[in-house]
Amino acid sequence: MQTNFTKKQQEDPEIKNTEDILRKCVHCGMCNATCPTFQVLGDELDGPRGRIYLIKDMIENNKAPTEKVVKHIDRCLSCYACMTTCPSGVNYMHIIDHGRNHIERNYKRPFLDRFLRNMLSYVLPRPNIFLLLGWLTKITKPLSFFMPGKIKNMVALMPTNFPKAQHKAKNIFKPEGKTVARVILLTGCVQKVISPQINDSTINILNRHGVEVHVSQEVSCCGSLNHHLGKEKLAHNSFIQNINAWTKISEKNPIDAIIVNTSGCGTTLKDYGFIFKNHLDTNLRKKAKQVSELAKDVTEYLGKNIKLNFIENKKQYKIAYHSACSMQHGQNVHQQPIDLLKKSGNTILEIPDGHLCCGSAGTYNLLQEKMASELLKRKVENIDKIKPDFISAGNIGCITQIATGSSIPIVHTIELLDWFTGGIKPKQINTE
């Protein structure tokens, strides 16, 4: 793609990087073939190629975003299926991030839109505030029919039951026997409130196989939520806090990996090095790069580094594996969890059109409920075609989204791997 950025513009590292990416694009349109929003709407501006043109035009010409441009950029799921498809290696992830930052800096949204986005930005990264809001939602749900559409949708999606964690918050979880490795675990924000058993299973399976698990109480949110809302400063504050907290741990003890069991968070952690590659603080640049290199999805780490001790199944199950977009497209981690699940002796089924998003995408199903509902409908129809006993997924957002549209139990992959290696059976699974 031809670009016309001025020399002055090219002095800005963010613009220079975007120009380098744009020049790789050859307009082939193969990205549209796997873009969920283009598949549903058939609008060129709701596909990656169209959005690239919109972002290029805004940034190259230093234009303030229009309502139309914002609508099409907001509809992007950041599923990154286009990156898997692109034959030219266009890093759409960094282009869409730049576009969102530009919109946040230069566009004043309508009041309700601003309010909802600011509320999500404040509440979701703070587990205690989220829990309080959950209890308030339980009281107000019967009155939700009085509420505006988007707020009503948020209330409907808000969980009202909050299970207790098996493990109390502490800094180190040690295995009973010999320690073969040491890792840091990102326990997350929303996940540890609505599904603490995911972190419990992660700690249990790691400890059972000789891995010492470190948790920093200074770390809550990975920063993804604000990052994808275009709230660059808030996101970077979280990034820096996390980088410093994890570096403090790794300086005391050699760390083999930073384990992530929420794939959306993992994609962002692996991008810390890029985000800070031009930062004036050279020490921060170095630490960010180290964090990105250490970040591993839990199945990615187990598949490469640990020989799991599977127990013999009394019964074999048909398990549908939902490959979260942030995992298969954002991190190129797709086969590893499938291979681990196959070692359990069960039948693992891949979902038809599994490259397409379920519609969760962080805050997407809260802000773009119509598109999210359509994508969920299509995902559930494809799951129903293969008639599984239950569904496995590696992202809490996908699990929550799919559970609202399907009666088939869905659990985190690590819960299943924990169960199949001697842990407890997930409560959601009621098959004998």
Image (cartoon, rainbow, N blue to C red):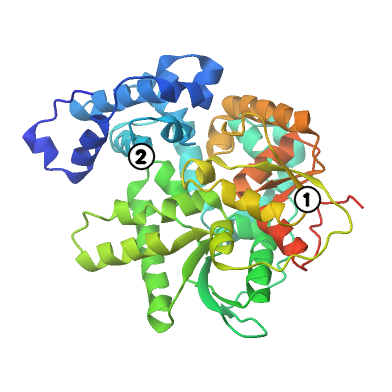
| Residue wearing tag 2 | 97
**x, y percentage for residue 35?**
49, 26
> Of residues 76 and 85, which is closer to you in this image?
85
Quadrant housing residue 213: bottom right
Q: Earlier in the sequence, mark 1 or mark 2?
A: 2
| Residue wearing tag 1 | 346
Q: Is residue 429 visible?
A: yes
Q: Are marks 1 and 2 in contact (CB under 8 Å)?
A: no
> Of residues 71 and 278, which is closer to you in this image?
278
* Amino acid type shown at disc 2: Asp
Quick check: 18 above or below 419? above
Find the residue positioned furthest to the right.
Answer: 432
Q: Residue at x 49, y 59 (%)?
A: 296
Quadrant housing residue 29: top left
Alpha carbon distance from label 1 to label 2: 39 Å
* Amino acid type shown at disc 1: Asn
> Of residues 52 and 115, which is closer to you in this image?
52
Quick check: 102 above or below 39? below
**x, y percentage for residue 340?**
65, 55
**x, y percentage for residue 107?**
32, 31
Q: For mark 2, give the secondary structure.
A: helix
Q: Residue at x 58, y 60 (%)?
A: 303
Quick check: 259 above or below 153? below
Find the residue positioned furthest to the left.
Answer: 7
- Callout in the foreground (1, 2): 1
Q: Residue at x 42, y 41 (%)?
A: 229
Quick check: 412 above or below 204? above
Q: For mark 1, give the secondary structure.
A: loop
